[in-house]
Amino acid sequence: MKAEEIIERLARGEGMFCGLVCGLDENHARWKPEPGKWSVLEVINHLHDEEREDFRHRLDLTLRAPEAAWPSINPEEWVRERKYNDRNLQSSIKNFVSERRRSVVWLRSLKSPEWKSSHKHPGIGPIRAGDILCAWLAHDYFHGRQISNILIQNTELLSAPFTIKYALG
């Protein structure tokens, strides 16, 4: 595993998300492609909470105390309970960027981390610290794609009576 490259890509992730959503108006940020699907604003707030309560925290526990129980998380419920779609987009992206920067500083401060340190996850079995780091980056790309898809669908609505077929080749 090339941990330094993964950490560098995580550092650049803030730019990816800012590039996708900064300047988007609040109505478009709250727009959902269909009931039950997430809005851009919900994705950004999900990323913020996952940054603090999932990836950084669980990686830290796996490195320091792999036998310790992980605190439970419920990202699907958080969307509603924490009222992600009622928040302000610019504040939400600022919060995410702040947490991401804290994560990157922390990751870069680790001295010879034992990436093979393993936690026994009750649902998926053993998961190593390196697995969490790699999944963290994949999670960024997954949600970057999700935001892109939401924006494509929204562009299609904005384009009527024209189409976006030419872009989709």
Image (spheres, grey):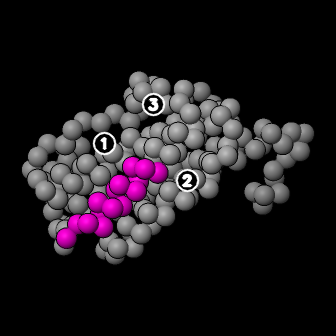
The kind of residue tagged 1 is Glu
Between marks 3 and 2, how big is the CA–CA gap?
A: 18 Å
N-terminal of the pair, mark 2 or mark 1, is: 2
Numbered tag placed on residue 53 in the rendering: 1
On the image, numbered disc 2 is attached to which residue?
Answer: 17
Q: N-terminal of the two: label 3 or label 2?
A: 2
* Number of numbered callouts drawn: 3
What separation in Å lies between label 3 and label 1 (alpha carbons)? Answer: 14 Å
Give the class, few, some or many, for how many residues have Cα within 10 Å of label 3's Cα (few <14, many ≥20).
some
Q: Position of residue 21 (x, y in %)?
A: 62, 48
- Tell us which disc is closer to us: 3 or 1: 1
Front residue of 81/15: it is 15
Residue 79 disc label: 3
Tag 2: residue type?
Phe
Quadrant of the image for the C terminus?
bottom right
Earlier-in-chain disc, 3 versus 1: 1
Q: Is residue 38 visible?
A: no
Instruction: Specify the segment rendered in magenta.
Output: 97-111
Quarter holding residue 70: top left
Q: Are marks 3 and 2 in contact (CB under 8 Å)?
A: no
Question: At numbered mark 1, what does the secondary structure look like: helix, strand or loop?
Answer: helix
Residue 95 image offset from top left, x and y in percent: 45, 43
For residue 5, what is the image quadrant?
Answer: bottom left
Secondary structure character of the magenta stretch overall: helix
